[in-house]
């Protein structure tokens, strides 16, 4: 049987997850405004302020990678892209090649 302290910690974890689910869309909306302005340096600063809370979120990681790429920080961008690609490699292999092409 779980102790009261363990139940309290579990409740705290759930509460943090709920807050993050609400926070990520707000953060991405702020990021979109800066992205449309082309203000990548400010966008990088916005993301750096949320790193402690969002570092494990794939949406956050992908957007940070895009921002770094747009600033020609390719090595840094790669460090964010690579885990995402590696984690979804099996999914990529199961798709037919024409579904993976980028459309312009």
Image (tube, rainbow, N blue to C red):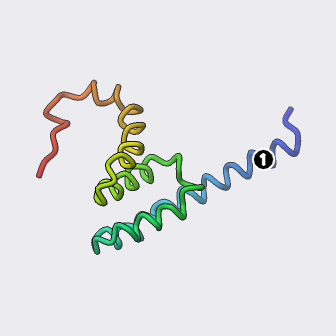
Give the residue pinned by disc 1. 9
- Observer-nearest of 17 and 73: 73
Say few, some or many: other residues with alpha carbon within 10 Å of mark 1 (under 14 / 14 to 19 / 20 or more). few
In which image quadrant can residue 52 be found? bottom right
| Residue occupying the point 40% across, 55% down | 64
Left or right, residue 24 beside residue 100: right
| Residue occupying the point 74% across, 50% down | 11
| Residue occupying the point 29% across, 30% down | 92
Left or right, residue 65 beside residue 95: right
Q: Is residue 72 above or below residue 89?
A: below
Residue 21 in the image, given as x and y percentages of width and height: 53, 56
Residue 91 in the image, given as x and y percentages of width and height: 33, 29
Left or right, residue 5 beside residue 57: right
Q: Is residue 96 above or below residue 46?
A: above
Q: Is residue 21 above or below residue 87?
A: below
Left or right, residue 42 beside residue 36: right
Q: Secondary structure at mark 1?
A: helix
Residue 49 in the image, given as x and y percentages of width and height: 54, 64
| Residue occupying the point 38% across, 55% down | 63
- Observer-nearest of 101 and 66: 66
Residue 15 in the image, given as x and y percentages of width and height: 67, 55
Does residue 12 appear anywhere in the picture? yes
In which image quadrant can residue 96 be found? top left
Does residue 29 appear anywhere in the picture? no
């Amino acid at each position: 049987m779980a102790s009261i302290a363990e139940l309290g910690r579990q409740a705290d974890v759930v509460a943090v997850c709920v807050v993050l689910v609400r926070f990520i869309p707000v953060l991405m909306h702020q990021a979109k405004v800066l992205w449309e302005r082309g203000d990548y340096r400010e966008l990088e600063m916005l993301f750096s302020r949320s790193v402690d809370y969002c570092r494990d979120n794939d949406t956050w990681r992908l957007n940070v990678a895009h921002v770094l790429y747009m600033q020609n920080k390719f090595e840094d961008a790669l460090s964010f892209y690579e885990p995402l690609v590696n984690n979804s490699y099996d999914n990529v292999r199961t798709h037919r090649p024409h579904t993976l092409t980028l459309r312009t």
